[in-house]
Image (cartoon, rainbow, N blue to C red):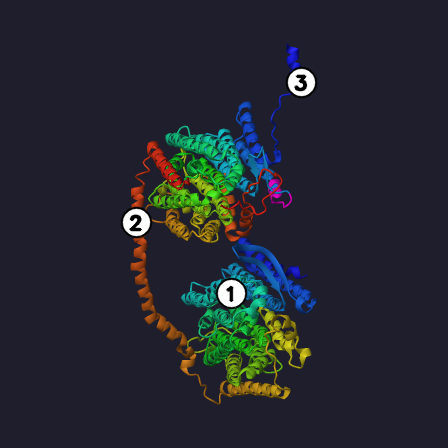
Amino acid sequence: MLASLWQQLSDSPVPIDSVDLAWAGLAPVMILIGGALLILAVDSLVPRRLRPGSYALATVLLAAGAMVAAVPLWQRVQDAERGPFATAAGAIMVDGFSVFATFVILSAVILAALSFDGWLRREEMDGAEPYVLMLLSASGGVMMASANDLIVMFLGLEILSIAVYVLAAMHLRKITSQEAGVKYFVLGAFSSAFFLYGIALIYGGTGSTNLVRIATYLSATVLGDSGLVLAGLALLLVGFGFKVAAAPFHFWAPDVYQGAPTPSVAWMASGVKVAGFAGLLRVFYLAFSTYRLDWQPVIFVLAVLTMLVGSVLAVVQTDVKRMLAYSSINHAGFILVAVQAATAAGVQAALFYLAAYTFMVAGSFGVIAVVSRKGDIGTSLDDYRGLSRDRPVVAFAFALLLLAQAGVPLTSGFFAKFYVITAAIEAGSSTLAIIAMITAVISSYVYLRIIVAMYGAGDDVPAPRTIPLPAAAGLALVISLTVTMSVGVFPGTLASLAERATPVLIPESDPGAVDPSGVPPGP
Amino acid sequence: MLDLVWLVPALPLAGFLILVVLGRRMGEPGAGWLATAMCGGAFVASAIVMAGLIGEQGENRRHLLTLFEWMKVGGFRVEVGFLADPLSITMALFITGIGTLIHLYSISYMHGDPKFSKFFIYMNLFVFSMLMLVLGSNMLVTFLGWEGVGACSYLLIAFWFSKDANASAGKKAFVTNRIGDWGFMCAMFLTFATVGSLDYSVVLEQAPLIAPATATAIALLLFLGACGKSAQLPLFVWLPDAMAGPTPVSALIHAATMVTAGVYLMTRVSPILTQSYDWAPSIIAWVGVITALFAATIALAQTDIKKVLAYSTVSQLGFMFLAIGSGAYVAAIFHMITHAFFKALLFLGAGSVIHGMHDEQDMRRMGNLKKYMPITAATFIVGWLAIAGVPPFAGFWSKDEILLSAYEKNPALWFVGLVTALLTAFYMSRQVFMVFFGEERWRDADHPDAPEPHESPWKMTLPLVVLAGLATMAGILNLPFGNRTHFLERWLEPVVGESEHTVTAAASAQIGLAALAVAGSLVGIAVAYRIYYQRKMEPVEPAIMAQGWKYDTSIAAFMGGPGREAFEATATFDGTVIDGAVNGVATLVRGSGVHLRKVQNGFVRTYALGVAVGVVALLAYFLSRVTF
């Protein structure tokens, strides 16, 4: 009996679906995940605590290693003969877009890790967990940026999000941190449900979750009833809108940003947002370009609402962390303006903005982490009075970063806004461009208000205090400032990188072929 | 060799950066020597590049070195690059050459100044900016240098800013130059809109295709910029005041280099000028010659040793624009070079006198200084003969070329130029006789024990001697004896050849004109000799000329009277209407913020409701677009 069964098995072996994997293409993700697990293992196996700073150092090295692994990918996808490629049965796409986003996300990891180091030591919470969570979260972000399948996109989103929920609630002795984590989690779960439902509807409407197949199907078929696809699009937009904190899905952001540990916020505001926008662009700009006339007006309205909420509500805040939370909502609105253009120039502008913004915002929250006091308190505007006297260099750096966020020339923020507005006008959305500029003016009030507080003199300046500046945090500040200023003076390099980072769809029938234009088929 | 052109501006830039970091630690005189060495290095680099250019022939005699792409916005691309051609390298050579001498001179002149190293920081930054201006391969890089030299000029005029007059002189220079810069910027916008590029190589190649009206507009807007920087009517008022700065600054920036930037610019864009309507060059020529005459009349009644030279500079720059307007670009550059030599010499000589006289600038209190300052006196006299146009000194040859071309353009221009040349000889002789000859006047009732003047140290006299040699010999650059001796003209041929006006007058007429010019100079000198040396005639120095025809004061009166009222009306308008609108918007924003934030109440259920509302709205919209 057993022998015959054995005979059967060896006669006709059960076919096992094996997926062809281009490991090199996945190397950045693998390094992040592997590194996270390694840190976790070391942390639990080594009997006593490692030297302080080892985990931060390891995280920075891992992120840098992932960057190094991404360099040959960039060369490969830019190479005219080899070009972008899909792997993992078409579920992952490695193209200029994904590699560019990977670089930006990894930069955010490095900046946030450097900021975490001193902060954790001050809060007496030094340990491996935040770094592990951030690395995992980053791997999810990279997955989102390179997802070529809605299921993978969702997987990336969840990996990214769940780690961030924990990062938000990480400060165990601080009730607002717990509150932030729970709020983020509940609302995040809510929106993830919509996202998943959207995927289901899209699958129902097109018969696939693969972005390439969806795009091919939609461009080849005129749907008798487009209801399912459209409803699915609406729900996908909810999911992405929540992740990038676009109004009216932004409510969580100010509360969570204010309550969560500041270095976590640095990561949330930079890396998480980049991942969210990368996913949004991939799905809407690439897969659903045939439906662009349907979704462009929606993005238009979302962009207007987001920019208005982000700028107007920032004006009435008195807490610097909260101000910057709203200002990052305003930035998200700006990037939506670029998305709304739905052109190659729009994608380029969005990528440029994301890259520039990552350094500005991670640097800014890094400053907040430094200036706050033990217990992660002391983030109100009053705490910034007299900073120019107590820590002149930090105050000056913060002022420059804030001016960059306001879009002052000679900083990267200026060109970021400039390219977005150019793209919007070229795409015929002058109204949106004008609204964007108006809100930029409104939010510059907020930045100036902080600068005035730092540099103001008068009776309300408190007595001098010593503000320790950890070396790692200083390094993060130097990096973000250097990038912000040098991109502001020489925007050409970053702009041309962003220009070459167009996302592509590779038709499945011919896996080696590349769409030379990189532009998806029009409607 | 040609690729080394980047080194020319890089060395002063390096000097600037090093001094910014280490300047105070290096102190005196280390900082000065470093700055001088950097400037000298740039001179050597320019000479090497020049040698490389000489090795090339004809159209190949230009080299474009692109360093990097600065920005790219749509079709607008700006590259930072250098254009090494005969024109730019000639400019670079004399800027760095004279710059080095003046740096050396300044080490002594600024001795003991508390801001010694800062002075050299600005000086190196100035040389760097000036080199960017002349070497830039497109208008934007030139403009960058243009603004850079303006900023340095401002900083150096107001270098001793604790004195009120100096600070306001700096401000005046800055504001006046802004008017010119506006012209330059508009010209750039117009050029880009017409040609689609700012690169000289593209713009000048396409120049013959530009519509004459557009070309005229571009040329005149650039000329407005040139008027500001090169102190021509109506924007010359800042230059005499700029003498508040240290004397080496006056020599380098306000005589030899920066103020000639306008002449350089007009020469650079000569094809555009050729393409414009005929009356455009005429305007330039007339503005130039009238400025020259106007400034010369003011110069002959000044009593401040530097003010005379300042007005003289304005006048000589007028000559250069006369040359530009007459199509004699080579003559303009030729005069620019000779002028740079003799005017730097005169200024440094004046500085030496001021130094030797213990900061006295009033010529009425000088006299017979040749006895106490022999080297300064001898070199100053060389400079005087050069500017007066006495052969064989350099000024004669270059001025003669200009007057010849002006004659062919319009004899009236020539006549005004001739009168100006006569006046030039007169007021310069007046200065020489008042300062170096006659009786010693520094001790009077008010100053019974003024110290005796003394000769300056070698670091100051060496540049004087070198410049005196150059001011004597520089005529060799472009002697009018047939084509063979027109060295400068053949050298600049690839740059301005197509726009250059060719002299058609017969040799006899040329000699006649030159003889008239020499006669004019000698008359000027002779009259001054009678009045100020022999004292046989009463000096004629009308007060109105001493006050510069009240030009400056009337501008001040206008700006202070009706102008101020207009500004105040604008300010009121700004205060009530504009600020009111802004404040209104701010109130509106704040008010709506206060209301909107009520939604942000901290309850998850509210937030979830917000998301749900958003979902419903999105679904409703998308489903409304369903096609059945």
**Prevailing SS of the magenta stretch:** helix
- Highlighted range, magenta: A72-81
Give the residue type at disc 1: Thr
Q: Mark 3 vs mark 1: tell me if same chain.
A: no
**Which mark is on residue A10?**
3
In the rendering, at what x and y percent does residue A191 appear? Answer: 41, 33
Can you say which quadrant of the picture contains the N terminus of chain A?
top right
Farthest residue toward the right?
Answer: B55
Horizontal side of B270 relative to A244 (left or right) equals right
Report, in whole angstroms, how far the alpha carbon at label 3 lies from the one at label 1. 80 Å
- Quarter-wise, where is residue B298 in the image? bottom left
Q: The disc numbered 1 marks a residue on which chain? A: B
Whole-percent x and y of residue A415? 48, 51
Point out the residue furthest to the bottom here.
B536
The residue where tag 2 is placed is B588
In front of the other: A104 or B110: A104
